[in-house]
């Protein structure tokens, strides 16, 4: 389960992308999370997924 707090969410997601998953799609599938919802929550903080670096920046 991912945290609801956007700042904590950013930290957890980027850590998981760095350590466990090779793409955002893989992370979302493994955690049963809607990619669009995750992107929206982090876009509210002005963070967007960068596939080249596999992280939200």
Image (spheres, grey):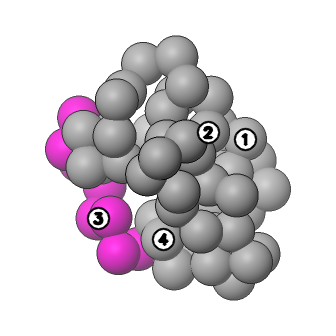
Disc number for residue 34: 3
Res 31 visible:
no
Sequence-wise, the earlier of marks 1 and 3 is 1
Magenta region: 29-37
Q: Which quadrant would residue 1 be assigned to in this image?
A: top left
The mark found on residue 39 in the picture is 4
Prevailing SS of the magenta stretch = helix
Marks 3/2: CA–CA distance: 16 Å
Choose the circle earlier in sequence order: 3 or 2: 2
Residue 40 placement (x, y as % from top left): 51, 79
Residue in the image at 31% along x and 55% along y: 33
Q: How far apart are marks 2 and 1 (CA)?
A: 5 Å
Identify the disc placed on residue 11: 1
> What is the crowding at mark 4: few (fewer than 14 residues within 10 Å), some, or many (at least 20)?
some
Q: Name the residue under label 2.
A: 14
In the image, which is nearer the foreground, mark 3 or mark 2? Answer: 2
Whether residue 2 appears in magenta in the rendering, the answer is no
Q: Which of the 4 quarters of the picture holds residue 56? A: bottom right
Dots 4 and 3: beta carbons under 8 Å? no
Measured as percent of width and height from the top left, residue 24 is found at 36, 48
The answer to the question of whether label 2 and label 1 lie on touching residues, with beta carbons closer than 8 A, is yes
């Amino acid at each position: 389960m991912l945290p609801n707090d956007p700042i904590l969410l950013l930290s957890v997601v980027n850590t998981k992308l760095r350590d466990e998953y090779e793409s955002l799609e893989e992370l979302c599938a493994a955690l049963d999370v809607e990619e669009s919802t995750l992107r929206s929550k982090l876009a509210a903080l002005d963070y967007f997924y960068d596939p080249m670096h596999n992280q939200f920046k």
